Amino acid sequence: MRMKLLCLALLFFASALYCQVVFLRVSRRFSAGGAKWYALASHIGKSSTPSMGGLVALGLVPFVVAASYLSGSAGLREMAHIWAYPVLAAVVGLADDALKARARSGDGLTSLQKLFLQVAVTLPWAAWASSRGVYLTPWIEIPQAYAAALLSFLGIGILNAVNVTDGLDGLAGSAMILSLCAVALLCGTDSAAASSVAGIAILAAFLWHNAHPAELFMGDVGAHLWGALLLSLCVESRFLAFVFPLAFIFGVEIITVAVQIFSIRFFGKKVFRMSPLHHHFELCGWKETKIVARFCLAHLAGMAAVLILLLTLFELYGGRY
């Protein structure tokens, strides 16, 4: 099994790397820039950097499913279960990116339009996934109605959390690789292992071009794809509780946005110089590469701390991993 996973990783790293090069050549002719509209003034120079790099990952999904099945690394049904939500979520991100590219600006879907589409793809998936059974841990099944509500909340939250984290060169991609490595180690099903290894390989190829100074951004299509994949892997592994440590830095980033908005609206004051949190540290004078490195270290530490806390609670209340 390990040899098959290694071969899959090499195959999809090489494939993604080649496809990214081709995509870059095409997108430099037609794509609008990828800097977010709420980014710092220092990011204006990134406005000409091609976005929608996640489109390559989306295009490789059918090949990931087929290769994993044909190599005997995972079952076809299980792989379809894992990748259904990421593909649907990526289509929402792609619609936003396409509108931005067409307008050649940061104007894509409005916040309400994006939220509506996120809900439109998340609710049916949550209902379908909950009908198959959702487990907080392998020994704790969540009642179907509660499972559908919880998956809907987590799904919409993680899509936006990864999206806001994707604001610095290499940040979201590097953090997601760390999360997928944890999935491969902790969530021990063959389909989860094959999907996470393929995801790591594709993201590594993306980081080849996204490392500072970035030649390519993942765009909403990539952020939505990877965020949904992380949640879907935890669901398929029957260990939904793992999403909390595995999404640690993404959760911190989206919480800082929520806190900032709440504080401004109700108290007229800012808690951070700018949100999400990585922009706060930029305004504090930290270099972009230092922020990315330290946030990845914080992500590792946060994953470990929350995981230890969860496993301790499970042990205290009679569970066993």
Image (cartoon, grey):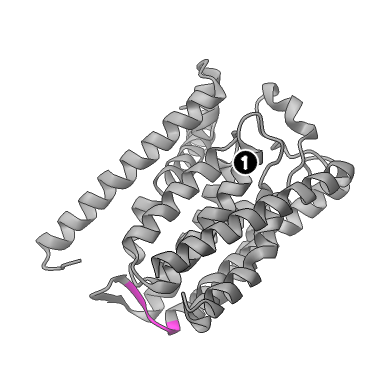
Q: Position of residue 317 (x, y in %)?
A: 12, 64
Q: Position of residue 180 (x, y in %)?
A: 44, 55
Could you tell me which residue is drawn at 72 percent across and 50 percent down?
A: 20
Residue 114 appears in the figure: no
Could you tell me which residue is drawn at 16 percent across and 67 percent down?
A: 320
Q: Secondary structure at mark 1?
A: helix
- Give the answer, above or below, for where 117 lies relative to 177: below
The C terminus: image quadrant:
bottom left
Could you tell me which residue is drawn at 79 percent across and 50 percent down?
A: 22
Residue 157 among those drawn in magenta:
no
Residue that protrudes farthest toward the top in the picture: 285
Residue 287 appears in the figure: yes
For mark 1, does the 10 Å Cα neighbourhood hold few (<14), some (14 to 19), or many (20 or more) residues? some
Q: Position of residue 140 (x, y in %)?
A: 25, 74
Q: Quadrant of residue 51?
A: top right
In front of the other: 17 or 273: 17
Residue 93 vs residue 24: left or right?
left
Q: Quadrant of residue 35?
A: top right
Q: Which residues are magenta?
A: 131-135
- Give the answer, above or below, for where 233 lies relative to 108: below
Label 1 sits on residue = 208
Residue 134 among those drawn in magenta:
yes
In front of the other: 173 or 315: 173
Q: Amino acid at mark 1?
A: Trp
| Count of marks placed on residues | 1
Q: Position of residue 260 (x, y in %)?
A: 50, 34
In front of the other: 112 or 88: 88
Could you tell me which residue is drawn at 61 percent across and 48 percent down?
A: 205
- Give the answer, above or below, for where 303 lies relative to 69: above
Residue 247 vs residue 82: left or right?
left
The N terminus: image quadrant:
bottom left
